[in-house]
Image (tube, helix red, strand yellow):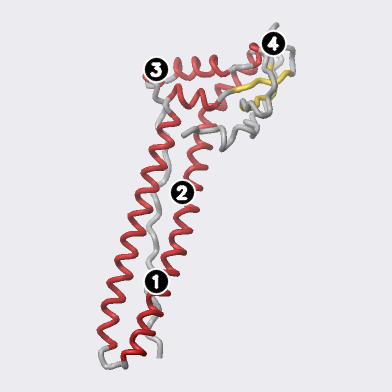
Amino acid sequence: MRVTGRWMAIAWLGLGLATGCNQTASTSVPQGAVAVIDLDAIASRLGSDKQIVDSLAQRQSSLSQQLVDLAKSYSQQIEEKKKTLTEAPPEQADVTVASWQKQANANLNKVKQQAEADLKKHQATLVAQFREQIKPVARRVAQKRGLTVIVTRNDNVLYDVAPGADITDEVIADLIAASPVASAAAAKPLQAAAAPPAEAAPPATQQR
């Protein structure tokens, strides 16, 4: 699973770099030129892509289990409520049970939609954290070359890139040098909140 590409390949990294007066621009790239960075390559080299995939898988598993537990809870509630219908005519009892089941299904669908939205939010948080980890190093490398704007690599947008404009390898080298674990192809673990518990809403009460 690629970390960028489909998620953020076209987006600007948004660094808004300002060149300091005491910095020397690279002689191979003119002042004010655009730097290009391959976030997919950085994520792959540092292991961040795997971390994001693993975190999403864990979050999805947790949310799925909550849905399973909620469905079981609704089923148990309905079975208990059926005991109150022993004296009701069979036709009325069937209608009542069907109503409870319909309400339970509606509640489950609502929770499922909330879970899907939570997973997307979790994904966006992880990607944003990854980008923020890279940003200061990318800014520093770009400034050393006299580059003031950074864009992410996207073959559908970028027709050609001069060698001096691509800062990916130098950013990777700086990240590895700065991190005791990056040399083992592992970036700092991305942190995110645990999956929120699904709120169980009881099926509708008996129709009268």
The residue to which callout 3 is attached is 183
x 30%, y 92%: residue: 88
The residue to which callout 1 is attached is 104
Check the image and name the residue furthest to the front. 91
Q: Which of the two discs, 4 and 1, labels the residue nearer the N terminus?
A: 4
Q: Which of the two discs, 2 and 3, labels the residue nearer the N terminus?
A: 2
Q: CA distance from mark 3 to mark 4?
A: 29 Å
Q: Quadrant of residue 190?
A: top left
Looking at the rendered image, the quarter that the C terminus falls into is: bottom left
Q: Which of the two discs, 2 and 1, labels the residue nearer the N terminus?
A: 1
Q: Which circle, 2 or 3, is nearer the viewer?
A: 2
Q: Which circle, 4 or 2, is nearer the viewer?
A: 2
x 48%, y 59%: residue: 113
Q: Which of the two discs, 3 and 4, labels the residue nearer the N terminus?
A: 4
Q: Position of residue 201 (x, y in %)?
A: 39, 70
Q: Residues within 10 Å of mark 4 (few under 14, many from 20)?
A: some
Check the image and name the residue furthest to the top. 27
Look at label 4 and name its amino acid.
Answer: Ala
Q: Residues within 10 Å of mark 3 (few under 14, many from 20)?
A: some
